[in-house]
């Protein structure tokens, strides 16, 4: 039969309950993934910042070389003295000193760089010194340039940097198609007279090496000022890039992210420009996006698998539950012999086993109730069959007692009075319970009667705490046992039969032990008797007995207190017999 699952179905509730922690776990996983993405991005930024710092340090190292070359010239005393007063007595000696002593100073300084990316020029104010191309030239070729003229007129500046578009035309060893940055310094004599200027030129493409084959996902470097991009390592849209970078140049150094690119920048104070490194985030973002998509797909697949697994498992559970419910309905309809056929060692198997045990206990309880009712009816019938008028018996016994007193037969009169009391105790219908004290008094009266009816010497010893005398027990609990001790414990004529009754509390139970020193019984009979006391109760067992014997006491004990409370017999032939009664003590 096809089963439909509504909103109130346990399956739907279980799926929802299982899905909630899964969804929470997914949200935590997404959060962790977000944090992981941020961490990866920060690590990427840190790595690119390290790359940028390396490139920036390398650029600053290249810009530091012109200062070293400048110091070689402006601090050379020999050169400064020659430019201040170069004339010697002999013209040939002058030229020899000029070419062999002065020109090599600049020439060797350039050779020190081991590169043709740097060039030194000395422009002399003293035109009496002839030019020595390409190292020594006259200043008049440069001082007309606005930047040079402004620099010479400003006494507060000792050097300036000129951008490629500010450099005046002059002879150069650098390739004609290479732009240069120029460091210009003043040359002074010891008396602070201006002797000229020295220029150290560095190739622009040496500072930032160009590569037209760089794609958009690789790093790109820029040099820019307030007006725009001066130089880039590859061909880019200068206006577009400048519009992106310029608004962020608020600090001397920093970085920012724009769309799919990461930008680092640092101010070069010497050039009054910014060095910028542009790095693509496309690969990082694509990898992160793919990771997120994969995680979402995995979570969706896991959720679907979880739902399918829950449906399969719950369906298996419900099949077993439906079988249990079917058996329960049949048991409720009256088929009390039906059992749940589930032997699995899990929770449902435990429920099935407990239910089966409950049915067994219920059946046993029903059996006991039926048997108690049957015993009660049989007792009522038996009482009706043997009912006689108690008052007639009591009056008759009193007539006999008074007759014996008149005849001065006081022992017989007392015994007859004890018999009347026993009879009254037996025929009393007010209750089925008595007390231990009343039971002991009944036994004492019974023993006094037995001493008259038999020639055997009999003694009774009772050991019991006085606080137990008022404890309630069922009627005729001890008298039949004492009767058995006298009836079956016969000894030789010269020996005395001793009956000892001990009553004490043991482990929340009241233990009553009746012991005699009679003939005892064989081991076979003892074992059979103990087994008989533990057999299931049958009303016929009482029916066969016309007197209240041991079996009767055992049946009443189990019916009143429970099946675990039955008689226990210990005996050794020709030595003793002990009968132990245990009842709950509260």
Image (cartoon, grey):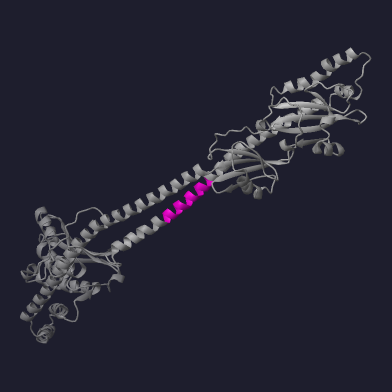
Q: Is 285 placed left or right of 117 in the picture?
A: left
The structure residue drawn at horizontal position 44% and vertical position 55%, both measured from the top left corner, is 27
Q: Is residue 538 above or below residue 261?
A: below
Q: Is 106 placed left or right of 263 in the picture?
A: right
Instruction: Point out residue 137 in the picture as x, y percentages from the top left corner.
Output: 82, 25
Q: Nearer the viewer, residue 327 or 391?
A: 327
Q: Is residue 245 above or below residue 419?
A: above
- In the rendered image, the quadrant that contains the N terminus is bottom left
Res 585 quadrant in image: bottom left
Q: Nearer the viewer, residue 447 or 209?
A: 209
Q: Is 304 placed left or right of 402 in the picture?
A: right
Instruction: Point out residue 9 in the picture as x, y percentages from the top left corner.
Output: 28, 65
* Residue 171 visible at all: yes
Majority secondary structure in the magenta region: helix
Instruction: Point out residue 463 in the picture as x, y percentages from the top left corner.
Output: 26, 65
Res 269 quadrant in image: top right
Residues shaded magenta:
24-39
Q: Nearer the viewer, residue 381 or 232?
A: 232
């Amino acid at each position: 039969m096809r089963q439909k699952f509504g909103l109130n179905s346990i399956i739907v509730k279980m799926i929802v309950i299982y899905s909630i922690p899964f969804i929470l776990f997914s949200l935590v996983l997404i959060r962790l993934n977000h944090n992981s993405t941020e961490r990866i991005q920060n690590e990427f930024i840190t790595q690119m910042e390290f790359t940028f710092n390396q490139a920036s340090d390398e650029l600053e190292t290249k810009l530091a070389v012109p200062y070293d070359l400048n110091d070689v010239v402006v601090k050379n005393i020999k050169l400064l003295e020659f430019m201040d007063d170069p004339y010697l007595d002999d013209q040939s000696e002058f030229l020899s000193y000029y070419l062999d002593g002065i020109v090599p100073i600049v020439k060797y300084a350039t050779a020190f760089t081991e590169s043709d990316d740097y060039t030194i020029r000395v422009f002399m104010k003293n035109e009496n010194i002839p030019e020595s191309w390409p190292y020594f030239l006259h200043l008049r070729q440069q001082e007309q340039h606005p930047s040079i003229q402004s620099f010479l007129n400003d006494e507060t500046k000792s050097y300036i940097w000129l951008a490629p578009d500010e450099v005046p035309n002059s002879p150069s060893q650098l390739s004609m198609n290479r732009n240069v940055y120029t460091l210009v310094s003043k040359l002074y004599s010891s008396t602070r007279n201006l002797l000229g200027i020295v220029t150290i030129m560095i190739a622009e493409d040496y500072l930032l090496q160009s590569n037209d084959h760089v794609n958009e996902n690789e790093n790109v470097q820029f040099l820019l000022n307030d007006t725009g991009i001066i130089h880039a390592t590859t061909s880019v849209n200068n206006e577009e890039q400048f519009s992106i970078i310029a608004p962020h140049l608020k600090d001397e150094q920093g970085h920012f992210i724009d769309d799919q690119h990461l930008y680092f920048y640092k101010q070069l104070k010497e050039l009054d420009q910014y060095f910028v490194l542009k790095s693509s985030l496309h690969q990082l973002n694509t990898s992160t996006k793919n990771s997120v998509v994969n995680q979402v797909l995995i979570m969706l697949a896991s959720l679907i698998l979880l739902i399918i697994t829950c449906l399969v498992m719950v369906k298996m559970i419900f099949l077993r539950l439906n079988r249990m419910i079917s058996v329960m309905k049949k048991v409720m309809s009256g088929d009390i012999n039906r059992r749940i056929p589930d032997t699995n060692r899990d929770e449902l198997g435990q429920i099935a086993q407990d239910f089966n045990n409950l049915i067994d206990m219920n059946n046993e309880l029903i059996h006991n109730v039926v048997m108690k009712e049957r015993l009660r009816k049989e007792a009522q019938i038996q009482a009706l069959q043997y009912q006689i008028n108690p008052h007639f018996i009591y009056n008759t016994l009193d007539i006999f007692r008074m007759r014996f007193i008149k005849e001065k037969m006081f022992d017989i009169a007392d015994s007859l009075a004890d018999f009347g009391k026993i009879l009254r105790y037996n025929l009393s219908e007010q209750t089925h319970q008595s007390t231990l004290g009343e039971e002991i008094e009944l036994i004492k009266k019974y023993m006094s009667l037995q001493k008259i009816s038999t020639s055997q010497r009999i003694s009774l010893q009772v050991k019991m705490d006085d606080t137990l005398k008022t404890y309630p027990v069922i009627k005729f609990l001890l008298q039949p046992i004492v009767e058995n001790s006298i009836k079956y414990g016969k000894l030789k004529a010269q020996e005395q039969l001793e009956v000892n009754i001990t009553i004490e509390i043991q482990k929340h139970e009241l233990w009553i032990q009746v012991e005699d020193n009679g003939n005892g019984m064989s081991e076979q009979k003892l074992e059979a008797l103990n087994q008989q006391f533990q057999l299931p109760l049958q009303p016929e067992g009482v029916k066969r007995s016309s007197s209240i014997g041991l079996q009767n006491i055992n049946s009443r004990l189990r019916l009143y207190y429970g099946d675990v409370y039955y008689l226990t017999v210990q005996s050794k032939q020709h030595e003793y017999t002990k009968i132990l009664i245990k009842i709950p003590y509260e």
